[in-house]
Image (cartoon, rainbow, N blue to C red):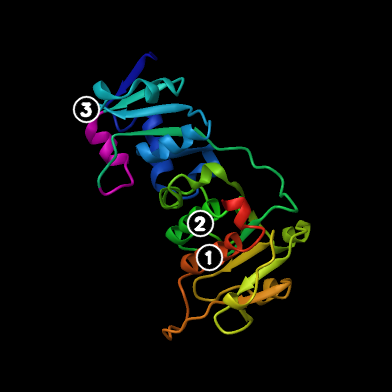
Amino acid sequence: MNAEIHISSRDNAFVKDLRRLSHDNAAYRKQGQVWLEGDHLCRAALARGLRPAVAVFSASFWPAAPAEWVQAAPKVIVLADALFAEISGLESPARMGYVLDLPAVRSLAPGAASVVLDRVQDAGNVGSILRSAAAFGFHQIVALKGTAALWGPKVLRAGMGAHFGLQLIEGVDAAALDALTVPLVVTSSHQGEFLHKRQPPYPCAWVMGHEGQGVSEALAARASVAVRIAQPGGEESLNVAAAAAICLYASAAYEGGAGRAA
């Protein structure tokens, strides 16, 4: 078993780095690491074959920590309970977490089934869209500038482990989409064909827009297809994460997606 290092000082350099990763949405870009708090995210990372750089446990949980969680990392830190609670980004602090080196960014895959995020700013919405994308076989996420930080702590928690099965590309301009060979499909509340009346192209790149402004006009002009979701209840629009789930499911349910999802 790895020898553990016990820390009780809030001024410790590792603790300061961990605090930034837990609370600062942009810290991962500077530090090249992300903080996975809680056993669910940690188990999801391990299931994908990822190896954490550091395993962190609260002092009270440390004696009962499962050996496989401890041995997954080359370095083990045990934090005083009060210190762990101070660092935690959760209302009810977890008892363990991993520091993971930020996965290398791969080049955009031109023919991959994709989701394009156009300035989607709410972390919960972004995380939820990532979960739907992973569930329905859209493994490439292209986040344009102005979108919430994909590896930020709130998006990580909302993604519930979906990050580890996706190829994430962020901070790019719309011009980067020129490399895609799959059709762009945009959604709108007021124009385009009704989704339930047509078969979405597959593979394709679904474009999900800003919560208030929707897809930008410049990006909509690039699209091959525009669709809207019928809302017989009379609401003006759907939450972007809900709309994404419906659209991605529609792609998976039709021929081409159905066999892949089975």
Element type at mark 3: loop
Do labels 1 and 2 touch, CB within 8 Å? yes
> Which span is picked out in magenta?
80-91
Task: Label 2, secondary structure: give it.
Answer: helix
Q: Residue 127 appears at what percent x and percent y?
A: 47, 55
| CA–CA distance in space, label 2 to label 3 | 36 Å
Q: Is residue 90 left or right of residue 116?
A: left
Q: Nearer the viewer, residue 109 or 106?
A: 109
- Please report the residue visible at 63 percent of the width from the left and 74 percent of the height from the top: 216
Q: Is residue 34 above or below residue 192?
A: above
**Among numbered discs 2 and 3, the one appearing first in the sequence:** 3
Question: Is 131 or 250 nearer to us in this picture?
Answer: 250
Frontmost of labels 3 and 1 is 1
Residue type at mark 1: give it: Ala
Does residue 151 appear left or right of residue 139 in this picture?
left
Q: In which quarter of the image is the N terminus?
A: top left
**Which residue bears the numbered disc 2?**
132
Q: Earlier in the sequence, mark 1 or mark 2?
A: 2
Foreground pick, 3 / 242: 242
Q: Mark 2 is on which residue type?
A: Ser
Residue that badge 3 annotates: 60
Whether 63 is among the magenta residues is no
Residue 244 - label: 1
Residue 149 lies, with reference to residue 1, above or below; the image says: below
